[in-house]
Image (tube, helix red, strand yellow):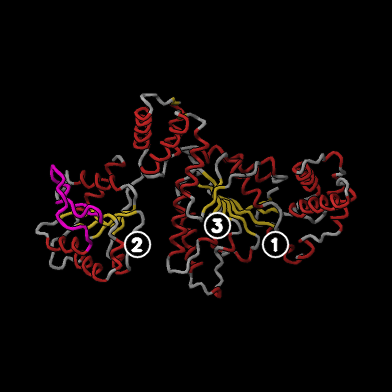
Amino acid sequence: MPRRMSELHDLVALIRANTPLIVIETRDEARVVELFRQALMQVWRELYRWSITEGLRRLDLDREDPPHVAPDASNTLQAMRDAPQRGIYVLFDMHPYLTYAGSQRMLRDLVQRRDCQPHVIVLVGHSVELPPDLESLALRYRPQMPDANARLKIVREEVEHYARENGGRRVEVDTEAVQQIVRNLRGLDPVDVRRIARQLIFRDGALNAGDLPELAKLKFELLTRSGHLHYEYDAAQMDDVAGARHLKRWIGQRRAVFLAAEPPPGLDPPKGMLLLGVQGCGKSMLAKAVAAGFGVPLVRLDFGTLYDKFHGETEKNLRMALESVEQLEPCVLWIDEIEKGISTDEGNGDGGVSRRVLGFLLTWMAERKSRVFLVATANQIDALPPELLRKGRFDEIFFVDLPDAEIRAQLFVVHLKKRGLDPSTFDVAALAAASDGFSGAEIEQAIVSGLYAAHAAGGALSDFTLRGELRNTRPLSVVMAERVDALRSWAQGRTVPAD
């Protein structure tokens, strides 16, 4: 059954069941009205629409009657109670008026069919928050997002709109690019599909491959505006990462399967990896490089912004964030220092929020069908719950260890070049030997400190200055030797070395 027919079938079933209260969260009010109009072809009811500006209007007649009830919420609810025939009442933005006790009582009586007809009441709005006693009586219905044909139809309508607005001037259309644009608009509601398509067309009067980066930017800005998600524009390239040979090979082997619309028989698409390691050894850089390795955008989930003091809001924020990420597929989702967001210490006093968040995340990891590759980074293995580490949660757990001499030499080359210095004028091998036990971040900071020292002395950075900075630095592997050694010991035999 086509998606559109399935959606209509579900709505007709709700009407036939005389569902008393339906909640629809959408900005596309016209589409909701049209769906109910189509439903009347299979099951007849009187159909009404209400808004505070227009009042109550009947829609199922050949003509649209003028409002016969003043645009007041209480009067409207009373008119519904007095109606002699059962009907469907589509109420736009009624929920703010339900904060009043009288309106709540009247709606509750209607929903419970006290001295009234068995109406189907539909509350429509962009975000519909109900009092708890009404929420328990409501059924939330989610209209399906437009499929490829519907999205293509919207794009074509905007192409025609551009021609009318510009004296018949035709839009320059690249057919292959349009197919990619339509595919990348997946997961957006019709309002946003139309808005983005119009913006791309009116920008230069064309739809071509040059619109794809702008489309990605617009879509990410749209879906990450909650503040929980952040689009990482400066994702690192694999070549920017020193070492990590095993991880790079792992990504290369799975890239084609991850990007395939239909994976080869017997191969499940890769789901995710956990990057565990010593602080400062490049886990964040590797997370960014994974997205580049797959050739897809990178989105970072900020766990700290999810938490809310009101019961259930934290879990709701996580659900909405993950739903937004799935609309951006294919992509990489990065959760940095995941142990800080899902700590399940019984003494943390959060009323079980962390435990519920962990449960929701684990369920999503196990059941998702979207092409979202999860990269989680962690520094403290003892803070991670066992449920997250068991086999099957992640495809692989990689350990990012302190760099050996060869990788340290590569790190000196990378960071010297990054600052416009010629690595061939330095004894890189000697610097690598002098930096035993240093992380990549500590090597970079030694170069930064050396540059400051050289600038203060009025000279250029030299090996002598760099070696002096290395001697004056106590790396984390020395300062926190016991903790670092314990982490490295735990990882041996339990994880796969990234390098």
379 magenta-colored? no
Label 3 SS: loop
What is the three-letter code of the residue carrying label 3? Asp
10 Å neighbourhood of mark 2: few (<14), some, or many (≥20)? some
User: Whole-percent x and y of residue 115?
Assistant: 12, 67
Which residue position is annotated with label 1?
A: 487
Part of the protein shown in magenta:
46-73
Q: Is residue 168 left or right of residue 282?
A: left
User: Whole-percent x and y of residue 457?
Assistant: 88, 51
Looking at the image, is mark 1 or mark 3 earlier in the sequence?
3
Which residue position is annotated with label 2?
A: 129
Label 2 SS: loop
Q: Residue at x 32, y 64 (%)?
A: 130
Q: Residue at x 28, y 62 (%)?
A: 138
What is the three-letter code of the residue carrying label 1? Leu
Label 1 SS: helix
Q: Nearer the viewer, residue 131 or 404?
A: 131
| Label 1 – label 3 distance at C-alpha | 25 Å
| Label 3 – label 2 distance at C-alpha | 24 Å
Q: Residue at x 28, y 69 (%)?
A: 100
Q: Which mark is residue 302?
A: 3
User: Whole-percent x and y of residue 33?
Assistant: 24, 47
| Label 1 – label 2 distance at C-alpha | 46 Å
Looking at the image, is mark 3 or mark 2 earlier in the sequence?
2
Closest to the camera, between mark 1 and mark 2, is 2
